[in-house]
Amino acid sequence: MNSFEVIGGKKLKGEIVPQGAKNEALQIISAVLLTPQKVTITNIPDILDVNLLIELLGEMNVKIERPQRDTCIFQADDVNVDYLSSDAYKQKSGRLRGSVMLAGPMLARFRKAFIPKPGGDKIGRRRLDTHIIGFEKLGASFNYLSGDGFFELNAPNLKGTYLMLDEPSVTGTANIIMAAVMAEGLTTIYNAACEPYIQQLCKMLNRMGAKISGIGSNLLTIEGVQSLGGTEHRMLPDMIEIGSFIGLAAMTQSDIIIKNAGIEHLGIIPEKFKQLGIQLHFKGDDIHVPAQEVYEIQTFLDGSVLTIYDHPWPGFTPDLLSIVLVVATQARGSVLIHQKMFESRLFFVDKLLDMGAQIILCDPHRAAVIGLGRKQNLRGIQMTSPDIRAGVSLLIAALSADGKSVIQNIEQIDRGYQYIDKRLQQLGADIKRI
C-alpha cells in the first residue's frame, strides 16, 4: 500500500490545469454503448476509476483507440452482452461505483443489464432505488441475485412514461435519461438533477440524434428515437479539483493560477470560498488565487455564525464540504459545516483534531469549526485516507502543517485526482510517494 510523505509549511506558486471532470466522464463514457458508430471523447481524466470503466468496456468487446491519454475513440459495434453475466464482470464492476452507469445504455440498446452493489469509497449508504424504480416505470423488470449481490434487469419493450424522481440523483437521472432516449414514446422526468454534468450528457446525446428538451432545468422531456449515431465530446474541467486547488492556495498562503477553469459552469462554488474570506480574481477563464496571510469567515447579515451545507445543484456540491472544513481551520472566525447527504463524510475530523485543529463534531452530519487564524499552525502526523475527498482534504492540511505527515491508503486519492503528487511538486510542494 502506497503512502504520501509530505513536508508541510511551504508556500507554493505557479499554474495548474484541472483534469477533466470525473463525474461527467463516468456518464459520458457509458453512453458510448448507445451507438454502434464511433464516439470520440477528449479531456478524459487519467485516473483509476475512469480507467477501470474504460477497461470494462474493452472487456465487453468495445473497440477502443487511445491516441492520447486524455482522448479515446470508442466503437461499440460488437458488444458481448453475455459478458455481463460472467464472473469476471461481476468482480470488476463491483469495484467501481461508476459501473452502475452502464445499465441505462445497455437496457436501451440491448434490453438487458446487470447492476452490482455500489462500490467506490466509504462515505455512507448509496441507494440504487432511483435507478431501479425509474427503469421499472420505463418497462424493465428486475431480479435481485442475493448470492452475487447483483440486480439483473430485462426490458423487452421500453416505453416512455412520466417519472417523478424521489430525489434529484445525478447518477439516477443520467441512467434514466440513457435508458429513455430509445424508449418508445415520450418520457418526462420531473425533479431531475440538473448539474452541468447532466447538461453535458444531454447535449452529447442530442448531437447523437436524441430528442431531449428542458436541458438545465429539473423537468426533462425525452422523445424516444430508434437509433443514435456517433459524435465528438469534450469533458468540462473538474469543479471538485478546482475547489480543491482554491482551498490548497488559501491554506498554504500560496499564489496559484488555475488555468482553463470553466468558470461559467462552477455555479456558487467561488462564492462559497469567498464567504470564507478567500480572494479570487477571474481573468478570462482562469482563476487567480493570490497569497493571503489571513482570511476571515463572513457571518450572516444578522451577525450569526455562517453555515455551509450541501444541496443538489445549483446548491453547493457535497464533494467540496470536506475541503471547506479544512480551509476553515486556519481562517479567522467560525463556521458550521452541515453534510446532509452522506453520514460518514465527516469521519476524518479526528485526524484534523490530532493535527491541532479546533473542531466540534456535533453528530455524523455536522461539525463546528473554530478557525485558528494562523495563530497556531497544524502539525504533521501519520494518518489514513478514508475516502477520495477526505483524502485530498487531509493532503491539503498536511501541506500547510508544520513538520512531516504521512498519509496512507492513497489509492483512494488516486481514484479521483490525476497524478496529484507530480502536479503539486511542480508548484513547489515537498511531497513524495513512498
Image: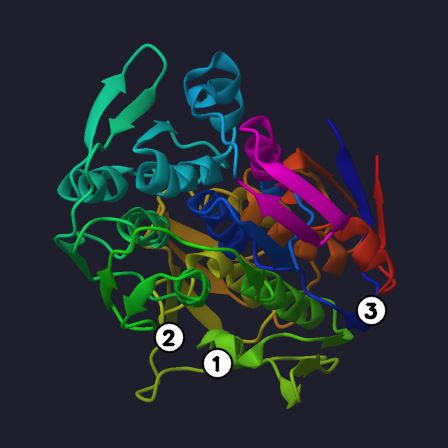
The residue that disc 1 covers is 271
**SS type, badge 3:** loop
Graded by Cα atoms within 10 Å as few (under 14), some (14 to 19) or many (20 or more), the crowding at tag 3 reads: some
The residue that disc 2 covers is 305
Say if residue 31 shows up in the picture: yes
Q: CA distance from mark 3 to mark 2?
A: 30 Å
Between 142 and 280, the residue placed more toward the observer is 142
Between 159 and 147, the residue placed more toward the observer is 159
The image shows residue 214, relative to residue 145, as above or below, that is below
Q: Amino acid at mark 3?
A: Lys
Side of 74 relative to 204 (left or right) = right
The residue that disc 3 covers is 11
> Mark 1 or 2 closer to N-term?
1
Percent across and percent down for residue 384 are 63, 35
Nearer the camera: disc 1 or disc 2: 1
**SS type, badge 2:** loop
Q: Evaluate if marks 3 and 2 touch, with contact meaning CB atoms under 8 Å apart.
A: no
Graded by Cα atoms within 10 Å as few (under 14), some (14 to 19) or many (20 or more), the crowding at tag 2 reads: some
Within the image, what quadrant is residue 196 found in?
A: bottom left
Q: Is residue 75 magenta?
A: yes
> Mark 3 or 2 closer to N-term?
3
Percent across and percent down for residue 90 are 46, 20
Q: CA distance from mark 1 to mark 3?
A: 24 Å
Query: Which residues are drawn in magenta?
Result: 51-76
Between 155 and 386, the residue placed more toward the observer is 155
Residue at 62% x, 72% y: name it: 373
Graded by Cα atoms within 10 Å as few (under 14), some (14 to 19) or many (20 or more), the crowding at tag 1 reads: some
